[in-house]
Amino acid sequence: MVKNSLELAKLIAKASDDKKARDVVMMNMEGLTTATDYFVVCSASSTTQVRAIADNVEDVLREQEGMEFLRKEGYREAEWVLLDYGDVVLHVFQQDAREYYALEQLWGDADLTTYVPED
């Protein structure tokens, strides 16, 4: 069982990376918004990959943690999928959408950590 929001963010980042998400970052949102503690942001090369990443995160959290998302947005279009787990929100973007919405710049005060898979 994950003990805190950072561990949850790392689990979501790993589940994203398992489906070959690119440029996976964890953004510490504590003190910047009351809505969530972390954003996990990543890129995918196609709508199929966007959905595969979102599906894998859903499956991993359900199977390993017994967690269901609170809200899911954008799945049909799969240009930008948001999965809200309360303390952590996952954003899976196609590259053009990620550059357009630029969450890392919009929330520039957030501490940003690049996800590095453990060996």
Image: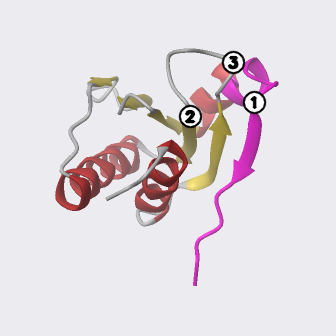
> Outermost residue, bottom direction?
119
Mark 3 or 1, nearer chain start: 3
- Which residue was labeled with disc 1? 110
Q: Which mark is residue 39?
A: 2
Q: Quadrant of the C terminus?
A: bottom right
Which residue type does callout 1 highlight? Ala
Q: Position of residue 8 (x, y in %)?
A: 44, 49
Q: Which mark is residue 32?
A: 3
Q: Position of residue 23 (x, y in %)?
A: 65, 52
The answer to the question of whether label 3 and label 1 lie on touching residues, with beta carbons closer than 8 A, is yes
Q: Position of residue 16 (x, y in %)?
A: 45, 55
The answer to the question of whether label 2 and label 1 lie on touching residues, with beta carbons closer than 8 A, is yes
Q: Residue at x 58, y 27 (%)?
A: 97
Q: Is residue 109 magenta?
A: yes
The answer to the question of whether label 2 and label 3 lie on touching residues, with beta carbons closer than 8 A, is no
Q: Quadrant of the N terminus?
A: bottom left
Query: Magenta residues?
Result: 102-119
Would you place residue 104 above or below residue 7 in this image? above
Q: Residue at x 33, y 51 (%)?
A: 57
